[in-house]
Image (tube, rainbow, N blue to C red):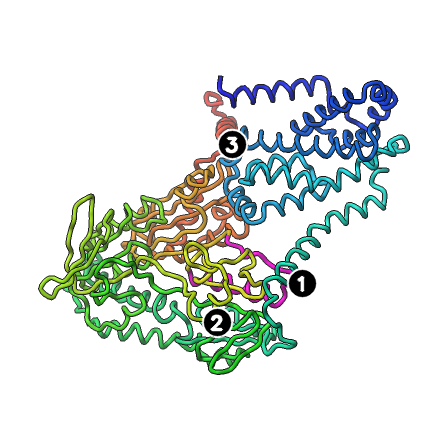
Amino acid sequence: MNKKIVLIIGAIVVLILASVFDVGSLLTLENIKAQQAKIDGLYNANPLLVAGSFFLIYVAVAALSIPGAVFLTLLSGAIFGLFKGLLIASFASTIGATLAFLASRYLLRNTVESKFGDKLYMINNSVEKEGAFYLFTMRLVPIFPFFLVNLVMGLTKIKTGVFYLVSQIGMLAGTFVFVNAGTQLAGINSVNEILSPKLLLSFALLGIFPIVAKKIVDFVKARKIYEKYEKPEQFDRDIVVIGAGSGGLVTAYIGAAVKAEVSLIEKHQMGGDCLNTGCVPSKALIKSAKLMHSIDTAEKYGLTDASANVDFKAAMDRVHGVIKAIEPHDSPERYRGLGVDVIEGEGKIIDPWRVAVNGTTLTTRNIVIATGARPFVPPIPGIEDVDYLTSDNLWEIEELPGKLVVLGGGPIGCELTQAFQRLGSDVHQVEMAPAIMGREDPEVAELVKAKFEADGVNVLVNTKATGFRKDNGRDVLIAEQDGKTIEIDFDKIIIAVGRKARVEGFGLEDLGIGLNANGTIEHNDYLQTDYPNIYAVGDVAGPYQFTHVSAHQAWYAAVNSLFGSLRKFRADYRVIPWATFTDPEVARVGLSETDAKEKNVAYEVTKYGIDDLDRAIADGTDYGFIKVLTVPGKDKILGVTIVGEHAGDLISEYVLAMKNGIGLNKVLGTIHIYPTLAESNKYVAGEWKRAHQPETVLKWLKKFHAWRRGDNKKV
């Protein structure tokens, strides 16, 4: 028979026996006091047998999470005295707790993960970072139900040895309190007497102790890391921010708003990549491409002889005009007007409190690194001989490439692929993975791929770039596809395979600040680096490379750096939306089906096809869908994917809903204007409601209506 089944049956049998013999009622203060004299006599006659039996009983009670462990702890003091009682109760409770921990891990893990996988995922992340400390904190508070600690920790990834050791140490103080009370058992008539004012104070101190201990540990760590640096007696600034992209701008804005002295250093262009080479220029180009596509397909709207020619230079001039129009929002003048000391120059961190720029050294209480990221260029043989483009220098070209290769199938690669194809380039998109848009569900990627191919794009997946060569003055990409070598000649190639954090050139290496495997700066939940007064935000920090996430992180960095001595806030990534601005747009918040399966999260899927939506049909954009993942049997939203026109705007309703715990029932009950694309959000909620109709109630209602009509045949 399967070992797991045997263990389950054994546990059930023991629990039934415990219930039949009412073990819980035996482990009460009244019963223990009544039997104390008899137990004392047995112990005096046979101390080893009584001690051993008591030990095993305690282990079993703790392992099976049977109520009464607290009274056994009292009894250990009453029978064995303070020292022996503490020794027995301490080891018995820890061994029993570890057995419960292992039973939970072995018997319940899969079931609980399937039901609460999203929560366990976050807990596991915390346990990986500070699991021992979290466990130690819970163990130091004796009034916390320890059996829950045992079971919950069994569902995390904490090591068994660590669990045992921390439990042994952490429970010792609380065990001492109860064993000591047990030595006075004869004079105690109720549990309330155990919780006297003095003991309540002891418990309060036990609860505060983890915080104090953490402060002491942090102080010791800080003292060690700062010991080789001389801290200034006074500071010029409260915050010095390096980098004026989204993260740096928002950090500086918040700091100045609360009247802190803030310096913002930028060596290149205010606004960072988003304004100058990313979000803004790409969306401006996409608009031109979409308009051209509308003209090319004008016949389906009843417009004949519609035509236009692409003046690529004029289109690029418009892109730069859009950048110029938005520049004032991020300009030095605006931020100086807000009270920020904007410095145009190259900053370098000298030590944790000093930053050099333009020949001057600023002293500062805090430093925020917001240096962003740059396009990653893979070391493909021969690439140095190719005049390749990236999202950095793409905006400098003035001629439309006749034959273009886009290397990469992520959001940037996909947006540029479709835009250039619609503007008139012959585009080959090359992606090494089995699908473009790899972070989305397969059906999403397939829909977008089909749209690309309908536009004329040659999408090559499972295709790895292996080299470049020249052929009669033409550039040629060499690639491997399904074990075969293919060659693609091109006029221009855009490298869009990802972005790499900017971590060099401003003193990071000299301080020895750690980096993650993906090259981003290591930081804790409060965005602090190895040096508690140095923070990292935005693309250089991860885990997301979105402008709105950079701004989101900036709030935490600004508030924690200025007010962290009073209270710190963990960066909250629970509800992070994003969109890829292809046609159709793809927007998502929360879990996709792929994510849910990987994290073993139970879910239901509700889907609504936008081809059914009146406004989409009228606009000729009747393609795509909304897919909502919910908790099985409930309307709680776990994640939403929208594929269709204006998906990036439509997703906001679900971001609000998830952020505020609003379910699909409330979305369904919200009035949406007719005819709008936003109605699709209401309709998908209606699909969920239809699938969860109270069938029994409806049957009785049918009979009720028949009775009221006098239709006795249907009653």
Q: Splitting the image into 4 quarters, where does residue 194 fall? A: top right
Badge 3 amino acid: Thr
Q: Which mark's residue is nearer the viewer, 1 or 3? A: 1
**Closest to the observer: 338 or 308?**
338
Q: Are marks 3 and 2 in contact (CB under 8 Å)?
A: no
Pick whichever of labels 2 and 1 is earlier in the sequence. 2
Please rate how many residues cluster around mark 2, counting C-alpha atoms within 10 Å: few if below 14, some from 14 to 19, many from 20.
many
Magenta part of the protein: which range? 546-573
Badge 2 amino acid: Ile
Say left or right for 424 vs 60.
Answer: left
Q: Position of residue 80 (x, y in %)?
A: 82, 29
SS label for mark 2: strand
Q: Position of residue 313 (x, y in %)?
A: 22, 74
Residue at 81% x, 48% y is 201
Q: Mark on residue 566?
A: 1
Which residue position is annotated with label 2?
A: 242
Residue at 9% x, 64% y is 472
Q: Is residue 195 above or below residue 337?
A: above
Residue at 16% x, 66% y is 307
Please rate how many residues cluster around mark 3, counting C-alpha atoms within 10 Å: few if below 14, some from 14 to 19, many from 20.
few
Q: Is residue 164 above or below residue 455?
A: above
